[in-house]
Image (cartoon, grey):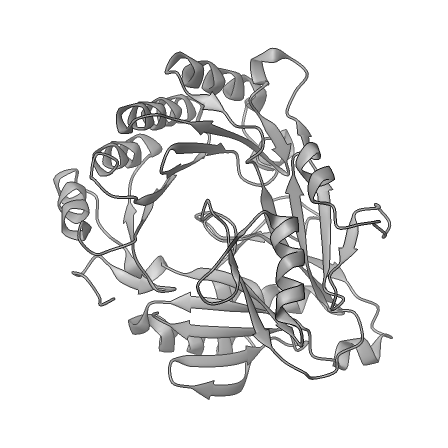
Amino acid sequence: MTEVGTDWRVVDGVSTAWFDAPSLIEAAALAGRIVELPAEIVVDLRATGMRVRLDSDEHAEAVSAAARDLGLAAKPAVLQQLSVVFESANPPVVRRFWQRVLDYAPAEDGGLVDPLRRDPAIRIRTSTDPRPLRNRIHLDVVRPAASVEQASPGAASGPFGVCHPDPDGNEVDLVPGGALGQGIGTADWQAVFSAMACYRITSPTQQRDLAAAAATLADDMGFPLLVDLRPGLVIIDSGKDQWEDDAHGLELDFTDLAGDLQTAARELGATADPRLPRFAQLFLDAADVAAVRAFWVAALGYTQDRRAGVSDIHDPRRLNPVLVFQELDASETERRRQRNRIHFELAVPSDLAQTRLATTVSAGGRVLAESEGRWRVADPEGNEMVIVSGA
């Protein structure tokens, strides 16, 4: 797949564009034109714009033309895709564990991919290096309680009783979500760290109208809602914790907005699918949380959570997973010295890879290895990320 026009870049093997928009309403207007195209296009609407991903380049110019007609400009410099890599001596066994926990689908590269293309892909590389101690990286996965019960790989441990190790000892906190509220007015919604409702739709017109209605309701209340359009589906999402008053900092009760969104969806004939909500985030243990957190803010271009005492950092467009940091006892020297069995992979456009590498190094990253279009970099405590150029 080659680069298509000036708006588009290949990111993680997919032709991708970001179009700035002054509001969710303007982004939804462009989405309304895109969903009419005869293609399975993936669209992520945000209060500041929208990301579009194409399975083929056939409709790239039509999308760009629609954006130009609406006065929306592309901004390729913000494009990136973060995924998670496991190194394992027995990839098939590890793959089966994570497929069940995440409800992912097999990918062509032997890893796993979110069928909804919202949460990070899992890649699995073969490695026989002995690494017996606990990783300093683990995943949190939150799904509806019934889905967690069905997916649970066995007895859980840890202080909250939700930690499960895979056959290699990589850990996931598999957390059951719950209803957003007690009333029928928000019955379609699940609280999975984010507040989320997933609606099945039957036509492009229904999808367009639901996206437009959601955008109007959110903009009227000044709330930066996430609206993701997938074939046959509209996902409406608050973003992590953003339904809580102290997180969004607005003069509103999110459950009121959720109720209005539910009413709009049902009036348009959309049907909620309570099995689908899922939230995944990445946890890093660090002896010096401030230093490691600062590195990842710079390396990923992330934003720090506005709340005091919360270590989260997030993609300013909320397109990539949240990172959370927790303190590691500095006396655990052997664990700190051991290479993790998990690292991250950051795909960026090929014309921006060198700039991203320079930013990462300036933030305190150490280049450990490089090959054609790939650079392995360690943060101040040895957690690793591979920067991948283009495909």
Looking at the image, can residue 231 be seen? yes
Vertical placement of 105 versus 35: above or below?
Answer: below
Q: Residue at x 27, y 62 (%)?
A: 9
Is 119 left or right of 68, judged from the image as shown?
right
**Quarter the C terminus occupies:** bottom left
Looking at the image, can residue 356 be seen? no
Q: Where is residue 321 in the image (x, y as percent from the top left)?
A: 54, 53
Vertical placement of 104 versus 176: above or below?
Answer: below
Residue 27 or 338: which is nearer the viewer? 338
Q: Which residue is drawn at 37% across and 16% down?
A: 268
Q: Determine which quarter of the picture holds residue 330.
A: bottom right
**Quarter the N terminus occupies:** bottom left
Vertical placement of 391 versus 113: above or below?
Answer: below
Q: Residue at x 22, y 68 (%)?
A: 2
Is 230 left or right of 259, judged from the image as shown?
left
Q: How many labels does the image show?
A: 0
Is 157 left or right of 237, judged from the image as shown?
right
Q: Where is residue 120 in the image (x, y as percent from the top left)?
A: 52, 55
Q: Determine which quarter of the picture holds residue 244.
A: top right
Q: Where is residue 225 in the image (x, y as percent from the top left)?
A: 45, 33
Q: Position of residue 272 (x, y in %)?
A: 50, 24
Residue 51 or 92: which is nearer the viewer? 92
Vertical placement of 243 versus 326: above or below?
Answer: above
